[in-house]
Image (tube, rainbow, N blue to C red):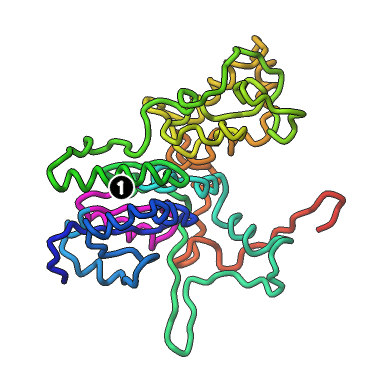
């Protein structure tokens, strides 16, 4: 066991894409500050580390852990509990840990449907119909894989979290600022925010950071940005009929996407005071619709290309909806895995009748 007097740093990647890991490395020379001020004791992407090394640490041994990714399988959950015990400060780092992220949209369907899509569709080269098995006997011994849970959960649905840092991934300058704050706090030169705070982000909305002008225009339909004949570089995208999530999304990114004529998709999560991201966004969209009657408003809302992805792209798993009904009902009882051992084959019909 190390006796280094430095504070100890850890980072773990659960159910996510790995972009959060890259974002930390993108703080450039500030990464040297991490090395200078912390002893890195567990970071599987950047160093050779084993779970048993963490298990051997005393509780509270790690000063700061950045935990990115949601909780999708048994291994993710076990590591969440382990790192919670071993860490003084546990940060839900990035959209997936904070809200469930894009993988949380899978909660709209069942585990069986997820595996059918992955292993038994026309886009999958799997002629023998091989599906993952919970255990496999090999000459070297029995191999096993973690149980796939019925739904994906955010980190705070599994263990208590000290701070949340949103973003997909968090902006590198925000990461550097948080690292600086923690270092100063450990040196007695600064004070950490209250537990439960959102760090590395603003307290307002992306709209407040966006330089585009709002002209209170009324729209008749929503459309994908590529369907616009031309994009007005100065006018609010939402008022041009582009479903931009800025009105409900927390500030802190600098409105990078709207400034590049791309709509905000909500990766910084709900703005301060927003209880349910999708509900706030629906109200914001309704406010620019050129209609007064409920049925007319519904017709305009029906032009949204992807309502679920629009309103809950990053936040479904941690929303008031929590999870899809089919996901709750989809705990298929395969021992140690969560799906049926011999799932029925589902064939998907393409346009034109091809199967």
Percent coordinates x, y for residue 101 in the rendering:
48, 45
| Quarter of the image with the N terminus in it | bottom left
Q: Which residue does the image show at 51% across and 50% down from the upper left?
A: 103
Residue toward you, 348 or 274: 274
Which residue appears at 37% of the width and 48% of the height?
A: 93
Give percent across and percent down for residue 320: 44, 33
* Image position of 187 (left or right of 203): left
263 relative to 274 in the view: left or right? right
Q: Which residues are magenta?
A: 64-92
Magenta-span inclusion, residue 79: yes
Instruction: Specify the quadrant of the image occupied by residue 310.
Output: top right
Q: Nearer the viewer, residue 295 or 195?
A: 195
Residue at the right extreme, as displayed: 352
Query: Is residue 21 visible to us here?
Result: yes
Query: Secondary structure under badge 1?
Result: strand
Residue drawn at x 60%, y 67% as measured from the top left:
342
At label 1, counting other C-alpha atoms closer than 10 Å, the crowd grade (few under 14, some 14-19, many 20 or more) is many
């Amino acid at each position: 066991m190390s006796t280094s007097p430095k504070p100890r740093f850890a980072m773990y990647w659960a159910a996510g894409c790995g972009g959060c890991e890259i974002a930390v490395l993108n703080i450039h020379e500030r990464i040297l500050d991490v090395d200078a001020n912390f002893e890195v004791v567990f970071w599987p992407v950047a160093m050779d580390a084993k779970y048993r090394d963490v298990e051997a640490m005393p509780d509270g041994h790690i000063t700061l852990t950045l935990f990115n990714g949601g909780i999708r399988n048994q291994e993710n959950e076990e590591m969440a509990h382990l790192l919670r015990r071993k860490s003084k400060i546990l940060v839900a780092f990035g959209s997936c840990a904070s809200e469930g992220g894009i993988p949380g949209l899978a909660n709209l369907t069942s585990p069986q449907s997820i595996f059918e899509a992955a292993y038994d569709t026309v886009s999958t080269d799997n002629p023998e119909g091989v599906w993952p098995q919970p255990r496999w006997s090999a000459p070297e011994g029995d191999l096993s894989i973690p149980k796939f849970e019925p739904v994906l959960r955010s980190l705070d649905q599994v263990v208590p979290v000290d701070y949340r840092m949103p973003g997909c991934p968090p902006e590198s300058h925000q990461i550097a600022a948080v690292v600086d704050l923690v270092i100063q706090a450990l040196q007695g030169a600064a004070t950490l925010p209250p537990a439960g705070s959102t760090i590395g982000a603003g307290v307002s909305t992306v709209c407040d950071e966006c330089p585009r002008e709002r002209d209170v225009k009324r729209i008749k339909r929503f459309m994908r940005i590529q369907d616009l004949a031309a994009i007005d570089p100065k006018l609010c995208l939402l008022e041009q009929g582009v479903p931009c999530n800025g009105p409900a999304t927390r500030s802190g990114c600098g409105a990078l996407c709207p400034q590049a004529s791309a709509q905000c998709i909500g990766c910084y999560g709900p703005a301060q005071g927003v209880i349910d991201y999708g509900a706030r966004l629906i109200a914001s969209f309704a406010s620019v619709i050129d209609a007064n009657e409920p049925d007319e408003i519904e017709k305009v809302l029906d032009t949204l290309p992807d309502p679920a992805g629009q309103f809950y792209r990053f936040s479904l798993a941690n929303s008031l909806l929590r999870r899809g009904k089919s996901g709750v009902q989809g705990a298929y009882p395969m021992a140690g895995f969560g799906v049926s051992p011999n799932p029925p084959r589902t064939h998907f019909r393409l346009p034109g009748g091809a199967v």
